[in-house]
Image (spheres, grey):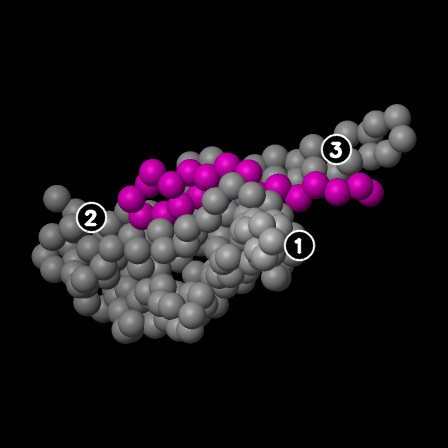
Amino acid sequence: MAEHIDAGKLDKPAQVLELRETAAGVWEWAPLRRAWANITFQAKSNLFSQVGVGARDAAIVIRRQPLTLHNALRLGEQHLFLTAITDRGRGHLDVDAAVVEPVSCTATRTEDTVGENAQPVTGETMRLTFPGVLAEKYARYERGETHAENETSYVLVTSKAIILKAGDLVTVQEGPAKGRYHVTVCHVLDAWKNEYEIMFSGDV
């Protein structure tokens, strides 16, 4: 049985978040309620991504309440990506989370349709703006005979509501990985999240 925790140790005012579509095609983390929590930042890594590297782990105790891995927590400026929730007993939950920094992303899809005179027309068929979490995958630098190609790949972790396809263009709007990427591989079997391998490739 888990160690009993008294109410006085639930001393951190966290916000419970849910992903909402706040306008057509625009998804944002929105606060649901405040929850007092006991949060311990761990030395170990939380492998929140199946195909990318992990992030710093946080062990959290909060009062039992409606909470799933579709939610997230915010403590000050820190965003906590929930990876496990278990019943601690005595009216509390144990929550495992990765400490991450979401970035604003815009995904677009263009597809060919048949226009007038049976001529192909290329048009945008999807545009989504959403928060995502980037994880390192690999970086490769190759020097050819006439040029060097800098090829960088990341893993983009999103909520289940964000559905992308291979070939979609993703623009990371902020942070050190800011830039334009193409979705190359989709991992969508997890019940709580989607993971997309995205690649930027260009001459340098």
Q: Amino acid at mark 2?
A: Thr
Q: Is residue 19 magenta?
A: no
From the image, which quarter does the N terminus lie in?
top left
Toward the right, the furthest residue is: 146
Asked if marks 2 and 3 touch (Cβ < 8 Å), the reply is no
Determine the residue positioned at 35% across, 67% down: 20
For marks 1 and 2, give the CA distance: 38 Å
Q: Earlier in the sequence, mark 2 or mark 3?
A: 2
Disc 3 packing (10 Å; few <14; some 14–19; many ≥20): few
Of the numbered discs 3 and 1, the one sitting upstream in the chain is: 3
Judged by its main secondary structure, the magenta piece is strand
Q: Amino acid at mark 3?
A: Tyr
Residue ID at (49%, 58%): 126
**Mark 3–mark 1 distance (CA, rounded to whole Å):** 18 Å
The residue segment tinted magenta is 184-204
Q: In the rendered structure, does residue 196 fall within the stretch colored magenta? A: yes
Q: Quick one: label 2, few (<14), some, or many (20+) residues within 10 Å?
A: few
Give amino acid for label 1. Answer: Gly
Could you tell me which quadrant the C terminus lies in?
Answer: top right
According to the image, label 2 marks what residue?
86
Which of discs 3 and 1 lies nearer the camera? The answer is 1
Identify the secondary structure beneath mark 1. Answer: strand
Q: Earlier in the sequence, mark 1 or mark 2?
A: 2
Picture coordinates of residue 72, whole percent (x, y): 35, 60
SS of the residue under disc 2: strand
Residue 161 percent location from the top left of the image:
36, 55
On residue 179, the disc is 1
Secondary element under disc 3, as helix, strand or loop, is strand
Residue corresponding to mark 3: 141
